[in-house]
């Protein structure tokens, strides 16, 4: 990740640098495009390329590359999550939700799969379903504080202020330095009064 960040700085202002050149230089992989042509079933080549596209915020390219990686490794739940994140960056929450659900079918014990599904549902304003996803995430990983925060946001949207307050208080009790949670709890108090 550090190498990608450094390369992003180098190429940031160079609009003429093509992705092909960038992909060749960034990870020290010679002629990555040529590798894709020679090894069309190599998931790692597509995943690496997609990560680089993400670093440069070329989400459409990242989506295509993750799609190709998924074609080469259908049972890899992580690839579906990554493409789901790209879909969210492209403001395509329904497509993201599809990927997260597929990831859950492949790996139902990964708390982050449910967390990301909850995020997509929250974006779609399906608050009850989002709450269920965040709760599953919390059940699998009770220290996933972002799941509590987002579940509280969902409860607040449904005007279930007591449940939202319970989640905010839980976070503050565990991590008293969480300034955004104090702010969100303060907003909740204003809404309640």
Image (spheres, grey):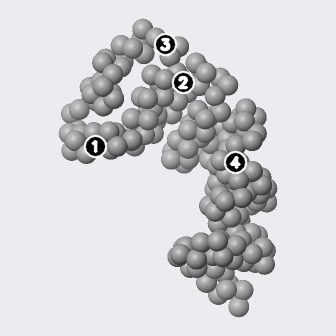
Asked if residue 83 lies left or right of residue 168, the reply is left
Say which residue label 3 marks: 40
Q: Secondary structure at mark 1?
A: helix
| Residue 181 in sight from this viewpoint | no
User: Mark 3, residues whose alpha carbon is within 10 Å: few (<14), some, or many (≥20)?
Assistant: some
> Marks 1 and 3: in contact by CB < 8 Å?
no
User: Mark 4, residues whose alpha carbon is within 10 Å: few (<14), some, or many (≥20)?
Assistant: many
Q: Which of 172 and 67 lies nearest the eye of the viewer?
A: 172
Residue pictured at 30% horizontal, 25% vertical: 28
| Residue 169 in sight from this viewpoint | yes
Residue 156 x/y as whole percent: 71, 72
Indicate which disc, 4 or 2, sits on the residue closer to the N terminus. 2
Q: Which mark is residue 6?
A: 1
Give the CA distance from mark 1 to mark 4: 31 Å
Residue 133 x/y as whole percent: 75, 53
Indicate which disc, 3 or 1, sits on the residue closer to the N terminus. 1
Indicate which disc, 1 or 2, sits on the residue closer to the N terminus. 1
Look at discs 3 and 1 and give the one toward the viewer: 1
Q: What is the tally of numbered marks visible in this picture?
A: 4
Indicate which disc, 1 or 4, sits on the residue closer to the N terminus. 1
Residue 121 x/y as whole percent: 69, 53
Look at discs 3 and 4 and give the one toward the viewer: 4
Give the CA distance from mark 1 to mark 2: 25 Å
Indicate which disc, 3 or 4, sits on the residue closer to the N terminus. 3
Residue pictured at 76% horizontal, 39% vertical: 108
Say which residue label 2 marks: 69
Say which residue label 4 marks: 111
Residue pictured at 65% horizontal, 58% vertical: 144
């Amino acid at each position: 990740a550090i190498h990608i960040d450094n390369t992003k700085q180098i190429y940031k202002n160079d609009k003429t640098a093509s992705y092909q050149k960038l992909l060749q230089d960034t990870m020290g992989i010679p002629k990555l495009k040529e590798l894709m042509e020679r090894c069309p079933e190599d998931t790692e080549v597509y995943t690496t390329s997609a990560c680089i596209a993400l670093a440069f915020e070329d989400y459409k390219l990242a989506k295509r590359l993750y799609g190709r990686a998924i074609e080469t490794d259908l049972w890899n739940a992580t690839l579906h999550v990554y493409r789901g994140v790209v879909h969210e960056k492209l403001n395509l929450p329904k497509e993201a939700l599809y990927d997260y659900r597929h990831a859950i079918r492949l790996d139902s014990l990964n708390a982050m799969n449910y967390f990301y599904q909850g995020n997509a549902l929250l974006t779609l304003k399906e608050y009850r379903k989002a709450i269920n996803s965040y709760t599953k995430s919390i059940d699998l990983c009770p220290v996933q504080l972002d799941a509590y925060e987002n579940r509280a946001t969902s409860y607040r949207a449904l005007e279930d202020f007591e449940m939202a307050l319970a989640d905010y208080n839980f976070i503050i009790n565990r991590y008293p330095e969480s300034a955004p949670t104090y702010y969100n709890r303060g907003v909740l108090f204003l809404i309640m009064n």
